[in-house]
Image (cartoon, grey):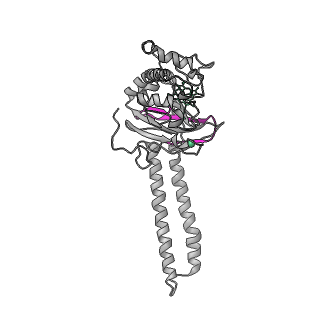
Amino acid sequence: MSAPAAQPAQSALHVAGPVAETLLDVTTVLTVGAALIFGGVMLLLAMSLRGGPRPVRARWWLLGGGIAFPVAVLSALFVYGERHRPAWRPVPPADALVVAVTGRMWWWEVRYDDPRTGRRFATANEIRLPAGRPVYFALASEDVIHSFWVPALGGKMDMVPGRMQHLLLQADAPGRWRGQCAEYCGEQHARMALDVVALAPAEFEAWADAQAQPVAPQAQRSVQAGRDAFLAHRCDACHAVRGVTAPGPDGHDVRRGPDLTHVGGRLSLGAATVPNTPEAMREWVAHTQQLKPGARMPAGDERLPPADIGDIAAWLSGLK
Ligand SMILES: [Cu+2]
């Protein structure tokens, strides 16, 4: 992956796509404009406080500064704002890649649906995008109000229970950014973050092809013990591992925890709480409540033999 090293991970001032660029332009125009007007008003105030004869009649100032000037400025801003609005309230192209993201306490369920290839699959806490192609986000919530925000790519959008919100985002070039839940949603709101990676189109296709596959049979054989312990301890009550766990009734297979089919290939664990290493995987399964207190997953150390935790973690880390 060719992520530019010096790039700040999470900043609305270091934009990486057209929507974020438009937002930054609008923000700059509004900020600079407001600063100029504020400065002008302060200047007039200073002049008036100095006393002495008034330069012009009060009536002129009241009508000009109190009515004509605000009407002109606000009308111009209205037109300017409306002209830029389509950038973030778009109509999606017919063949747009759809990524449905559902906010949950305190992680992100991510589902891909690509009309070009017919591929559909689920993942969590990480979104990979093809650089240069607009991606249509369908945003929802399963519990409380969350807010989806990847500052480098665009503005925030609330995720409201019972509603579907939309956002069209595009990354211009390969890179890696951080997203963050931007609406306070409880205890672990701060650790509800997200890795966003834009890949070159061919790399993206290869990644999506691999994600759509269930767990490969040889991976199952090589660490059979971990797989068996995963099922024996009923981790599958909350986690799907395609090819291993029994599929849900509809094609969607929605469970209470993240889809783990390719968890070993993700960048982080626990919604960007810790980088994904084999040690971190073991830590997560054993001491969930220490890494992320309140996370809606029971810690392994309270009920699983250490050997089983080791086996399960090794197996999960291998699911690339
Ligand atoms: Cu939140």
Vertical arrangement, residue 310 with respect to residue 166, above or below: above
Q: Where residue 14 sits: x, y (%)?
A: 40, 47
Residue 201 counted in the magenta span: no
Q: Where residue 140 sits: x, y (%)?
A: 60, 36
Q: Quadrant of residue 198?
A: top left
Q: Quadrant of residue 153?
A: top left
Picture quarter with the C terminus: top left
**What range is drawn magenta here?**
124-149
Q: Nearer the viewer, residue 4 or 283?
A: 283
Residue 135 counted in the magenta span: yes
Vertical arrangement, residue 9 with respect to residue 257, above or below: below
Which residue is rendered at x = 36% and y = 44% of the image?
A: 7
Vertical arrangement, residue 66 with respect to residue 168, above or below: below
State whether the magenta stretch is mostly helix, strand or loop: strand
Which residue is rendered at x = 55% and y = 42% of the image?
A: 189
For this view, does 22 lie left or right of residue 174?
A: right
For this view, does 64 lie left or right of residue 162?
A: left
Q: Quadrant of ligand 1?
A: top right
Residue 126 can be seen, yes or no: yes
Q: Nearer the viewer, residue 125 or 67?
A: 125
Q: Where residue 221 sits: x, y (%)?
A: 44, 12
Vertical arrangement, residue 170 with respect to residue 215, above or below: below
Q: Nearer the viewer, residue 49 or 83?
A: 49
Residue 97 can be seen, yes or no: no
Which residue is rendered at x = 45% and y = 36% of the image?
A: 274
For this view, does 187 lie left or right of residue 212?
A: right
Q: Where residue 20 sits: x, y (%)?
A: 45, 45
